[in-house]
Amino acid sequence: MKYLIGTALAILIAAPAAAQSAGAIQSSGRVEARFGWDRGEFKTELRDPLVDISDKNGKSGVTYGIEAGYDYVTDSRFLVGGYVGVEGSSIKDCATTPFGERDCLKGGRNFTVGARAGYVTDQGVVYLKGGYSNGQLKFEAEDFVDDERVRFKDNHGGFHLGAGGEVMVTNNVYGKLEYVFTNYSSDKFDDGITYAKFRPQRHQLVAGIGLRF
């Protein structure tokens, strides 16, 4: 909730500074570059006859990518649209064990596809969005003693929800601020004796610059 409130306040502050000559948004395609704060959170559960562990930790980094879509604006200024996007992440979390092994978890590419709905103002648009996400995690284990290295990638599907706003700078160029929460699918293992679960989630606060055409 605090991310949504912060996004809304920033949009209200930025809107009056937009160029007054920019007209209201019309039905059009759009493409944008995005950059901002990225936080991955990981919840791990492990239970067996001897152990019962539940742990949650996170790591922050930078997200960067592009998004493209089309918006349809009705006569009553309601906006509905669809979009696709791809982004990368700088998130990286590493730990070294006393036995000479270094384990790293890195954020990989993230694909998004979804829809959004909002209301068009004289200077831009405020909207809600939601859709499907497919994110990638990269695991790397390196044993310095035995000089061995293991790498693999793990893809997670899930859904994202967000809210944001855009301000027209000119008739074709806009700036934006957006918050997005993503909940990915879990990895589970259960053989009747040992139960393990790994669930990733994501919070993002991004700014962008885009072009309507």
Image (tube, rainbow, N blue to C red):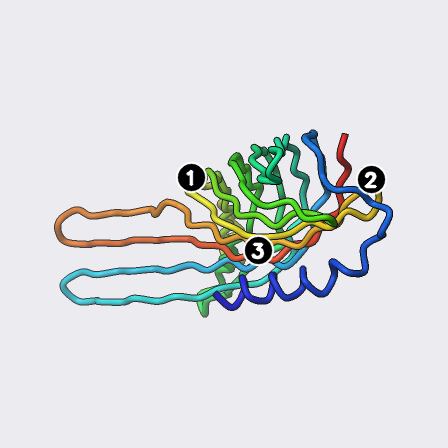
Q: Where is residue 159 in the image (x, y as percent from the top left)?
A: 43, 43
Q: Is residue 22 left or right of residue 137?
A: right
Q: Is residue 65 left or right of residue 38?
A: right
Q: Name above or below for residue 189 compared with residue 44.
A: above
Q: Which of marks 1 and 3 is nearer the N terminus?
A: 1
Please tell me in which quadrant of the rendered image residue 60 appears: bottom right
Residue drawn at (57%, 34%) of the image: 81
Callout 2 secondary element: loop
Residue 171's label in the rendered image is 2
Q: Position of residue 36 (x, y in %)?
A: 67, 56
Q: Which amino acid does label 3 sit on?
A: Tyr
Is disc 1 surrounded by few (<14), some (14 to 19) or many (20+) residues within 10 Å? some
Q: In this view, does 61 lie to the left or right of 135?
A: right
Q: Name above or below for residue 53 compared with residue 163.
A: below
* Badge 1 vs badge 3, beta-carbon distance below 8 Å: no
Q: Position of residue 99 (x, y in %)?
A: 44, 65
Q: Earlier in the sequence, mark 2 or mark 1?
A: 1
Q: Distance between the residues labelled 1 and 3?
A: 19 Å
The residue to which callout 3 is attached is 179
Q: What residue type is labelled 1?
A: Gly
Is disc 3 surrounded by few (<14), some (14 to 19) or many (20+) residues within 10 Å? many
Residue 137's label in the rendered image is none
The residue to which callout 1 is attached is 157
Q: Earlier in the sequence, mark 3 or mark 2?
A: 2
